[in-house]
Amino acid sequence: MFCPKIDTSRHAAYFGPMEPTPLQIAAQRLAQADKVAVLTGAGISAESGVPTFRGADGLWEKYRPEDLATPQAFARDPELVWRWYHWRRGLIAECFPNPAHQALVNMEKRVASFTLITQNVDGLHRLAGSRNILEVHGNLWMVRCTACGTLYEQRELDLPPRPACRECGGFLRPHVVWFGESLDSRILEAAWQAAAQCQVMLVVGTSAVVQPAAGLASVAKQAGAFVIEVNLEPTPNSREVDVSLMGKAGEIMPQLAQ
Ligand code: BJW
Protein backbone atom coordinates (compact mmCIF):
# COMPACT_ATOMS: atom_id res chain seq x y z
CA MET A 1 0.00 0.00 0.00
CA PHE A 2 1.26 3.48 -0.85
CA CYS A 3 1.66 5.38 2.39
CA PRO A 4 3.10 8.87 1.85
CA LYS A 5 5.22 10.48 4.56
CA ILE A 6 3.76 13.86 5.38
CA ASP A 7 5.81 16.65 6.89
CA THR A 8 2.98 18.17 8.95
CA SER A 9 5.05 21.23 9.93
CA ARG A 10 4.89 22.38 6.30
CA HIS A 11 1.16 21.77 6.17
CA ALA A 12 0.11 23.57 9.34
CA ALA A 13 -2.64 25.35 7.44
CA TYR A 14 -4.28 21.96 6.82
CA PHE A 15 -3.41 20.08 10.00
CA GLY A 16 -3.20 22.93 12.53
CA PRO A 17 -0.17 23.31 14.81
CA MET A 18 1.20 20.06 16.29
CA GLU A 19 0.34 19.55 19.97
CA PRO A 20 3.50 19.08 22.04
CA THR A 21 3.77 15.64 23.60
CA PRO A 22 3.85 15.24 27.40
CA LEU A 23 7.55 14.44 27.10
CA GLN A 24 8.17 17.67 25.16
CA ILE A 25 6.15 19.70 27.67
CA ALA A 26 8.12 18.20 30.56
CA ALA A 27 11.48 18.71 28.81
CA GLN A 28 10.62 22.33 28.09
CA ARG A 29 9.61 23.02 31.70
CA LEU A 30 12.89 21.52 32.86
CA ALA A 31 14.90 23.51 30.32
CA GLN A 32 13.31 26.76 31.52
CA ALA A 33 13.69 26.11 35.26
CA ASP A 34 16.57 27.32 37.34
CA LYS A 35 15.44 25.64 40.56
CA VAL A 36 14.96 21.90 40.16
CA ALA A 37 14.47 19.19 42.76
CA VAL A 38 14.56 15.49 41.91
CA LEU A 39 13.34 12.59 44.03
CA THR A 40 14.57 9.17 43.02
CA GLY A 41 13.73 5.66 44.17
CA ALA A 42 14.84 2.11 43.48
CA GLY A 43 13.38 2.16 39.93
CA ILE A 44 16.14 4.46 38.69
CA SER A 45 18.73 1.81 39.55
CA ALA A 46 16.70 -1.14 38.25
CA GLU A 47 18.32 -0.95 34.80
CA SER A 48 21.72 -1.05 36.52
CA GLY A 49 20.76 -4.44 37.99
CA VAL A 50 19.87 -3.29 41.52
CA PRO A 51 16.69 -5.03 42.75
CA THR A 52 13.72 -2.83 43.64
CA PHE A 53 11.74 -3.42 46.85
CA ARG A 54 8.18 -3.77 45.63
CA GLY A 55 6.62 -5.41 42.58
CA ALA A 56 6.96 -8.92 41.19
CA ASP A 57 10.78 -9.10 41.38
CA GLY A 58 11.09 -6.82 44.41
CA LEU A 59 13.07 -7.73 47.52
CA TRP A 60 9.95 -7.61 49.69
CA GLU A 61 8.46 -10.45 47.62
CA LYS A 62 11.22 -12.75 48.89
CA TYR A 63 12.16 -11.24 52.25
CA ARG A 64 10.05 -9.80 55.05
CA PRO A 65 10.96 -6.21 55.97
CA GLU A 66 10.05 -7.04 59.59
CA ASP A 67 12.91 -9.60 59.63
CA LEU A 68 15.56 -7.45 57.95
CA ALA A 69 14.80 -3.73 57.88
CA THR A 70 13.71 -2.71 61.36
CA PRO A 71 15.71 -1.89 64.50
CA GLN A 72 13.85 -4.74 66.25
CA ALA A 73 15.05 -7.23 63.63
CA PHE A 74 18.64 -6.06 64.10
CA ALA A 75 18.37 -6.34 67.90
CA ARG A 76 16.91 -9.86 67.57
CA ASP A 77 19.32 -11.29 65.01
CA PRO A 78 22.09 -8.90 63.92
CA GLU A 79 24.01 -11.59 62.04
CA LEU A 80 21.00 -12.39 59.87
CA VAL A 81 20.51 -8.70 59.07
CA TRP A 82 24.22 -8.26 58.32
CA ARG A 83 24.15 -11.34 56.07
CA TRP A 84 21.41 -9.68 54.02
CA TYR A 85 23.44 -6.48 53.77
CA HIS A 86 26.64 -8.38 52.91
CA TRP A 87 24.73 -10.02 50.04
CA ARG A 88 23.30 -6.71 48.81
CA ARG A 89 26.65 -4.94 49.08
CA GLY A 90 28.25 -7.69 46.96
CA LEU A 91 25.48 -7.42 44.38
CA ILE A 92 25.57 -3.60 44.16
CA ALA A 93 29.38 -3.55 43.98
CA GLU A 94 28.96 -5.11 40.52
CA CYS A 95 26.46 -2.47 39.35
CA PHE A 96 27.18 0.73 37.47
CA PRO A 97 25.18 3.91 36.83
CA ASN A 98 22.85 3.81 33.82
CA PRO A 99 21.74 6.55 31.38
CA ALA A 100 19.11 7.80 33.87
CA HIS A 101 21.77 8.51 36.52
CA GLN A 102 23.92 10.14 33.83
CA ALA A 103 21.02 12.33 32.66
CA LEU A 104 20.76 13.79 36.17
CA VAL A 105 24.49 14.54 36.19
CA ASN A 106 24.05 16.49 32.94
CA MET A 107 20.96 18.28 34.26
CA GLU A 108 22.78 19.38 37.41
CA LYS A 109 25.51 20.99 35.28
CA ARG A 110 23.11 23.41 33.64
CA VAL A 111 20.58 24.15 36.39
CA ALA A 112 21.52 26.95 38.81
CA SER A 113 19.93 25.34 41.87
CA PHE A 114 19.68 21.57 41.67
CA THR A 115 18.95 19.17 44.53
CA LEU A 116 18.90 15.42 44.09
CA ILE A 117 16.95 13.74 46.88
CA THR A 118 17.36 9.98 46.75
CA GLN A 119 15.81 7.19 48.78
CA ASN A 120 18.41 4.85 47.33
CA VAL A 121 21.25 3.54 49.46
CA ASP A 122 23.25 2.12 46.54
CA GLY A 123 25.53 5.13 46.00
CA LEU A 124 25.05 5.04 42.20
CA HIS A 125 24.17 8.75 41.91
CA ARG A 126 27.49 9.69 43.53
CA LEU A 127 29.35 7.17 41.37
CA ALA A 128 27.75 8.72 38.27
CA GLY A 129 29.01 12.18 39.30
CA SER A 130 25.97 13.91 40.84
CA ARG A 131 27.08 16.36 43.50
CA ASN A 132 24.25 17.94 45.48
CA ILE A 133 22.72 14.72 46.81
CA LEU A 134 20.53 14.18 49.87
CA GLU A 135 20.50 10.48 50.76
CA VAL A 136 17.39 10.43 52.92
CA HIS A 137 17.57 6.68 53.70
CA GLY A 138 21.34 6.56 54.22
CA ASN A 139 24.02 4.72 52.29
CA LEU A 140 24.89 1.04 52.12
CA TRP A 141 28.61 1.82 51.98
CA MET A 142 28.57 3.70 55.29
CA VAL A 143 28.63 2.01 58.70
CA ARG A 144 27.78 3.42 62.12
CA CYS A 145 28.95 2.24 65.53
CA THR A 146 26.10 1.28 67.86
CA ALA A 147 28.38 2.06 70.84
CA CYS A 148 30.28 5.30 70.07
CA GLY A 149 28.24 6.55 67.07
CA THR A 150 31.27 6.90 64.77
CA LEU A 151 30.21 7.01 61.14
CA TYR A 152 32.56 6.03 58.35
CA GLU A 153 32.78 4.60 54.86
CA GLN A 154 33.37 0.85 54.71
CA ARG A 155 33.64 -0.60 51.21
CA GLU A 156 35.27 -3.92 52.08
CA LEU A 157 33.14 -6.81 50.92
CA ASP A 158 34.54 -9.57 53.11
CA LEU A 159 33.45 -8.11 56.43
CA PRO A 160 33.11 -10.53 59.38
CA PRO A 161 29.59 -11.69 60.35
CA ARG A 162 29.62 -9.19 63.28
CA PRO A 163 31.70 -6.23 62.04
CA ALA A 164 33.42 -4.15 64.74
CA CYS A 165 34.06 -0.40 64.96
CA ARG A 166 37.59 0.64 64.02
CA GLU A 167 37.53 3.28 66.82
CA CYS A 168 36.15 1.46 69.86
CA GLY A 169 35.56 -2.15 68.80
CA GLY A 170 31.80 -1.70 69.29
CA PHE A 171 29.24 -3.39 67.09
CA LEU A 172 28.63 -1.76 63.70
CA ARG A 173 25.35 -1.42 61.83
CA PRO A 174 24.64 -0.33 58.26
CA HIS A 175 24.05 3.43 58.06
CA VAL A 176 20.60 3.10 56.54
CA VAL A 177 17.14 4.10 57.75
CA TRP A 178 14.95 1.18 58.75
CA PHE A 179 11.18 1.19 59.21
CA GLY A 180 10.19 2.95 62.39
CA GLU A 181 13.42 4.94 62.53
CA SER A 182 13.52 8.69 62.04
CA LEU A 183 15.28 10.16 59.06
CA ASP A 184 18.22 12.50 59.77
CA SER A 185 16.40 15.74 60.60
CA ARG A 186 18.90 18.01 58.81
CA ILE A 187 18.75 15.96 55.62
CA LEU A 188 14.96 15.77 55.76
CA GLU A 189 14.68 19.51 56.38
CA ALA A 190 16.94 20.22 53.38
CA ALA A 191 14.84 17.88 51.22
CA TRP A 192 11.65 19.60 52.36
CA GLN A 193 13.10 23.01 51.55
CA ALA A 194 14.27 21.91 48.10
CA ALA A 195 10.79 20.54 47.36
CA ALA A 196 9.07 23.66 48.65
CA GLN A 197 11.32 26.05 46.71
CA CYS A 198 11.77 24.35 43.34
CA GLN A 199 10.02 25.39 40.13
CA VAL A 200 10.09 21.87 38.74
CA MET A 201 10.16 18.59 40.64
CA LEU A 202 11.03 15.35 38.92
CA VAL A 203 10.01 12.12 40.67
CA VAL A 204 11.71 9.06 39.20
CA GLY A 205 11.29 5.34 39.89
CA THR A 206 9.62 5.37 43.26
CA SER A 207 6.43 3.58 44.30
CA ALA A 208 5.73 6.63 46.50
CA VAL A 209 4.43 4.59 49.41
CA VAL A 210 7.16 5.11 52.00
CA GLN A 211 6.78 8.20 54.14
CA PRO A 212 7.98 10.80 54.68
CA ALA A 213 9.87 10.81 51.33
CA ALA A 214 6.71 10.02 49.36
CA GLY A 215 5.15 13.27 50.60
CA LEU A 216 7.80 15.46 48.95
CA ALA A 217 5.99 15.54 45.60
CA SER A 218 2.89 16.96 47.31
CA VAL A 219 5.02 19.54 49.11
CA ALA A 220 6.38 20.71 45.76
CA LYS A 221 2.97 20.66 44.08
CA GLN A 222 1.32 22.63 46.87
CA ALA A 223 4.12 25.20 46.72
CA GLY A 224 3.36 25.75 43.02
CA ALA A 225 5.99 23.58 41.33
CA PHE A 226 5.43 21.75 38.05
CA VAL A 227 5.74 18.06 38.98
CA ILE A 228 6.87 15.38 36.53
CA GLU A 229 6.77 11.66 37.29
CA VAL A 230 8.76 8.97 35.48
CA ASN A 231 7.74 5.39 36.28
CA LEU A 232 6.90 2.09 34.65
CA GLU A 233 3.45 2.22 36.20
CA PRO A 234 1.04 4.61 37.96
CA THR A 235 1.72 5.44 41.61
CA PRO A 236 -0.25 7.24 44.35
CA ASN A 237 1.39 10.44 43.03
CA SER A 238 0.21 10.01 39.44
CA ARG A 239 -3.10 11.81 39.76
CA GLU A 240 -1.55 14.82 41.44
CA VAL A 241 1.41 15.37 39.12
CA ASP A 242 1.35 17.61 36.03
CA VAL A 243 2.94 15.11 33.67
CA SER A 244 3.24 11.37 34.17
CA LEU A 245 5.68 9.66 31.81
CA MET A 246 5.31 5.89 31.75
CA GLY A 247 8.35 3.93 30.71
CA LYS A 248 11.90 3.04 31.61
CA ALA A 249 13.86 5.75 33.38
CA GLY A 250 16.95 4.82 31.37
CA GLU A 251 15.10 5.67 28.16
CA ILE A 252 13.01 8.66 29.25
CA MET A 253 15.53 10.55 31.39
CA PRO A 254 18.12 11.19 28.64
CA GLN A 255 15.33 12.66 26.46
CA LEU A 256 14.12 14.84 29.33
CA ALA A 257 17.60 16.15 30.07
CA GLN A 258 18.44 17.02 26.46
C1 BJW B 1 10.84 1.88 37.44
C2 BJW B 1 11.75 1.07 36.74
C3 BJW B 1 12.41 1.62 35.63
C4 BJW B 1 10.92 -0.07 38.39
N1 BJW B 1 12.15 2.88 35.28
N2 BJW B 1 10.59 3.11 37.06
C5 BJW B 1 2.70 7.91 57.49
C6 BJW B 1 1.70 7.06 57.08
C7 BJW B 1 1.88 5.68 57.08
C8 BJW B 1 3.07 5.12 57.51
C9 BJW B 1 4.07 5.97 57.92
C10 BJW B 1 3.90 7.33 57.92
N3 BJW B 1 5.06 7.91 58.34
C11 BJW B 1 5.94 6.94 58.62
C12 BJW B 1 5.37 5.75 58.38
C13 BJW B 1 5.99 4.43 58.57
C14 BJW B 1 6.94 4.04 57.46
C15 BJW B 1 6.18 3.96 56.14
O1 BJW B 1 6.19 4.83 55.30
N4 BJW B 1 5.50 2.83 55.93
C16 BJW B 1 4.72 2.63 54.70
C17 BJW B 1 5.37 1.53 53.86
C18 BJW B 1 3.32 2.28 55.10
N5 BJW B 1 8.05 4.99 57.36
C19 BJW B 1 9.08 4.91 58.19
O2 BJW B 1 9.13 4.07 59.07
C20 BJW B 1 10.18 5.93 57.99
N6 BJW B 1 10.48 6.52 59.24
C21 BJW B 1 9.73 7.50 59.77
O3 BJW B 1 8.85 8.06 59.14
O4 BJW B 1 10.04 7.81 61.08
C22 BJW B 1 9.07 8.48 61.86
C23 BJW B 1 7.88 7.56 62.08
C24 BJW B 1 8.05 6.22 62.32
C25 BJW B 1 6.95 5.38 62.52
C26 BJW B 1 5.65 5.90 62.44
C27 BJW B 1 5.49 7.26 62.18
C28 BJW B 1 6.61 8.10 62.00
C29 BJW B 1 11.46 5.23 57.56
C30 BJW B 1 11.34 4.59 56.22
C31 BJW B 1 12.60 3.80 55.92
C32 BJW B 1 12.52 3.03 54.61
N7 BJW B 1 13.61 2.12 54.52
C33 BJW B 1 13.79 1.37 53.30
C34 BJW B 1 15.01 0.43 53.50
C35 BJW B 1 16.30 1.29 53.45
C36 BJW B 1 17.51 0.49 53.78
C37 BJW B 1 17.88 -0.53 52.75
O5 BJW B 1 17.74 -0.34 51.53
O6 BJW B 1 18.32 -1.57 53.18
O7 BJW B 1 14.00 2.24 52.20
S1 BJW B 1 12.35 0.41 52.82
C38 BJW B 1 12.55 0.68 51.08
O8 BJW B 1 11.44 1.48 50.59
C39 BJW B 1 13.81 1.56 50.94
C40 BJW B 1 13.39 2.51 49.88
O9 BJW B 1 14.20 3.66 49.91
C41 BJW B 1 11.94 2.75 50.19
C42 BJW B 1 11.15 3.29 49.04
O10 BJW B 1 11.10 2.37 47.99
P1 BJW B 1 11.20 2.87 46.48
O11 BJW B 1 12.50 3.50 46.25
O12 BJW B 1 10.02 3.66 46.14
O13 BJW B 1 11.25 1.48 45.69
P2 BJW B 1 10.02 0.51 45.29
O14 BJW B 1 10.60 -0.82 45.03
O15 BJW B 1 8.92 0.58 46.26
O16 BJW B 1 9.46 1.13 43.94
C43 BJW B 1 10.21 1.09 42.74
C44 BJW B 1 9.42 1.85 41.68
O17 BJW B 1 10.22 1.95 40.52
C45 BJW B 1 8.11 1.18 41.27
O18 BJW B 1 7.07 2.15 41.27
C46 BJW B 1 8.38 0.67 39.85
O19 BJW B 1 7.23 0.73 39.01
C47 BJW B 1 9.43 1.64 39.38
N8 BJW B 1 10.39 1.11 38.38
N9 BJW B 1 11.83 -0.18 37.28
C48 BJW B 1 11.26 3.59 35.93
N10 BJW B 1 13.33 0.88 34.85
Image (cartoon, grey):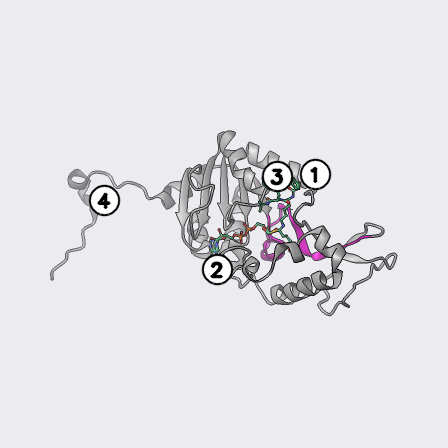
**Pointer 1 with pointer 4, Cβ within 8 A:** no
Mark 2: C-beta under 8 Å from nearest atom of ligand 1:
no
Q: What SS does tag 2 mark?
A: loop
Q: Is residue 87 above or below residue 232?
A: below
Name the residue beneath numbered marker 4: 9
Q: Please state if 91 lies on the left or on the right of 184 as rendered.
A: left
The alpha-carbon separation of the residues under discs 1 and 4 comes to 51 Å
Please state which of the two labelled residues, at mark 3 or mark 4, is closer to the viewer. Answer: 3
Q: Element at badge 1?
A: helix
Of circles 2 and 1, the one toward us is 2
Label 1 crowd (10 A; few <14 / some 14-19 / many >=20): few
Q: Earlier in the sequence, mark 4 or mark 2?
A: 4
Q: How would you rate the neighbour count of disc 2 (Cα within 10 Å): few for under 14, some for 14-19, many for 20 or more?
A: few
Q: Report which residue position mark 2 lands on.
A: 56
Cβ at disc 4 under 8 Å from ligand 1: no
Residue behind mark 3: 191
Residue at the location (81% across, 52% down)? 150
The CA distance from mark 3 to mark 4 is 43 Å
Cα separation, mark 3 vs mark 2, equals 30 Å
Say whether disc 3 or disc 2 marks the residue closer to the N-terminus.
2
Task: Give the mark nearest the N terminus, 3 or 4.
Answer: 4
Whether residue 143 is visible: no
